[in-house]
Image: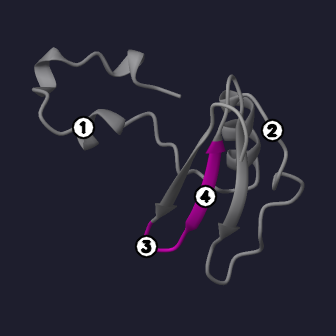
């Protein structure tokens, strides 16, 4: 990994993924989803976040739920949150 980048790993009940966050792009570097087929054409392809999310959702992978993301933020009272500003 070179430049200003970081790696975020996500493990959920049925999905494990790893993302490399760069300057203006996100790269899906690892993905597994139990017995479901892997995502096609997305691994190791730097993309703008909203494009990556759209492509993953198109393939049936929705690990970026914007409709309830405010429920997962700790330490902030819900009445102070604007869910429209938290969406991906």
Residue 47 versus residue 56: which sits nearer the camera? 47
What residue does disc 3 label? 13
Q: Pointers 1 and 4 in contact (CB under 8 A)?
A: no
Residue 13 in the magenta stretch? The answer is yes
| Disc on the earlier residue, 1 or 4 | 4
* Outermost right residue: 41
Disc 2 on helix, strand or loop? loop
Labels 4 and 2: the sequence-earlier one: 4
User: Are the residues flagged by discs 1 and 3 in contact, CB closer than 8 Å?
Assistant: no
Residue 3: percent from left, percent from top: 70, 33
Q: Which residue is mark 4?
A: 18
Q: Residues within 10 Å of mark 4 (few under 14, many from 20)?
A: some
Q: Residue at x 76, y 54 (%)?
A: 59
Frontmost residue, 27 versus 78:
27
Percent position (x, y) of residue 62?
58, 51
> Would residue 14 be counted in the magenta stretch?
yes
- Tag 3: Cα neighbours inside 10 Å, few (<14), some, or many (≥20)? few
Is there a contact, CB below 8 Å, between mark 1 and mark 2?
no
Secondary structure beneath dot 1 equals loop
9 over 52 or under it: above or below? below
């Amino acid at each position: 990994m070179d430049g200003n980048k970081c790696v975020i790993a996500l493990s959920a009940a049925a999905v494990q993924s790893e993302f490399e966050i760069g300057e203006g792009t996100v790269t899906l570097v690892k993905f597994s989803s139990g017995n479901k087929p892997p995502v096609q054409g997305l691994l190791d392809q730097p993309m703008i976040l909203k494009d990556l999310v759209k492509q993953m959702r198109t393939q049936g992978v929705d690990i970026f739920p914007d409709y309830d993301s405010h429920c997962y933020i700790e330490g902030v009272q819900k009445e102070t949150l604007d869910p429209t500003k938290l969406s991906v």
